[in-house]
Amino acid sequence: MVGEATNLRSEELNFCFEKLMMVGGNNSGVVKMKGLAITEWKDIPMELLLRIVSLVDDRTVIMASGVCSGWRDAICLGLTYLSLSWTIFPFPGHAVLALCKKNMNNLVLSLAPKFTKLQTLVLRQDKPQLEDNAVEAIANSCHDLQDLDLSKSFKLSDRSLCALALGCPNLIKLNISGCTAFSDHALAYLTEYCRKLKILNLCGCVKAATDYALQAIGRNCSELQSLNLGWCENVGDVGVMSLAYGCPDLRSLDLCGCVHITDDSVIALANRCLHLISLGLYYCRNITDRAMYSLAQSRVKNKPEMWEPMKKSRYDEEGLKSLNISQCTALTPSAVQALCDTFPALHTCSWRHSLVMSGCLNLTSVHCACAIQPHPHPHRTANSIPHPAH
């Protein structure tokens, strides 16, 4: 993006940037680069302009884009990351905006047609303001969009998902958590066009996340790696099993609060999603020992070659690294212990708590390998800092 306009070398760009900062707005100062004399701010090439813009605040970025057509085009062409949330992310090379609450919808309407090269757009809100016409403007202008965060946009309707389906087919990551008005038919329609989705957050989307929608996801989104279905109480075994069969590369699945799923869902995941490393089953009280044993046994059944001594270390690194079975009160210690023994990355020790069992008093006897072969505490040995749970 940035280096393509004039192909400036990094050292030359740094030199000119420093010189410009010293010269400031004084027209008597001249900076030369590649035979080009910069005597006025309007003469600054795209690379230098974007370097300067990355240092200023959101208000200044918007003002800079209105200085002249050259600056507007440079900023709009160079901007690939835009955040209109309450958090400012100071990423080098990206202009990131923070926005006043009452202006979000209008600002999106005005900016979307200009910033046509956006690949990442964060519209996270504490108070919902975003409306369908703003999302439609994004879909009509930002066809390269890959990462979109619309979380907590309570005012959005199915119109938004339909617009995204037609205008943003390159979406890889979509967060619509808390968007309670979306329907399962609109979500299914989206998946027919956005088949590149790898990360999808549907937490709290009770109307959208149903077995009907999950069947569509399994049918259309074979590249999906991460899915959050937390507190989607209309999800059942039919939907989860469709995911398991249609999305074999699934790595992370949050089913916390999906109270209707049973062992059949977990067994399908164990047998089909061989790369699964994170599974949330909080409050799934229909889950029994049968599900735990299926997870443990599938590792041996699906990857028998990993038992070869020369591959043992690689085997230890694979499989579940994070599991939440809190409030799954039907489970017994023997089944959970078998799972813990099978997956060395599941820890019950306090400093690497990747097997969460709160609310299951009958599981207090379950322990990880650390209880038998203690590992150095991470605060005592720098090299023993645990890998964060996914």
Image (tube, helix red, strand yellow):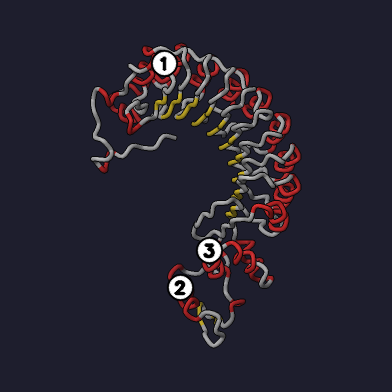
Can you tell which quarter of the image residue 247 is in?
top right
Amino acid at circle 1? Gln
Q: Are marks 2 and 1 in contact (CB under 8 Å)?
A: no
As helix, strand or loop, the secondary structure at mark 1 comes to helix
Q: Are marks 2 and 3 in contact (CB under 8 Å)?
A: no
**How many numbered marks are there?**
3
Of residues 41 and 331, the one drawn nearer to the viewer in this rendering = 331
Q: Which residue is disc 1 drawn over? A: 297
Q: Which residue is disc 3 drawn over? A: 54
Mark 2, Cα crowd under 10 Å, few <14 / some 14-19 / many 20+, is few
Say which label, 2 or 3, has the lower sequence index.
Answer: 2
As helix, strand or loop, the secondary structure at mark 2 comes to helix
Q: Taking 194 as reference, is 281 above or below it?
A: above
Q: Which residue is disc 2 drawn over? A: 12
Of residues 373 and 73, the one drawn nearer to the viewer in this rendering = 373
Q: Quadrant of the N terminus?
A: bottom right
- Residue at image point 73% right, 45% down: 131
Mark 3, Cα crowd under 10 Å, few <14 / some 14-19 / many 20+, is some
Amino acid at circle 3? Ser
Say which label, 2 or 1, has the lower sequence index.
Answer: 2
Q: Where's residue 180, x and y in %?
A: 67, 34
As helix, strand or loop, the secondary structure at mark 3 comes to loop
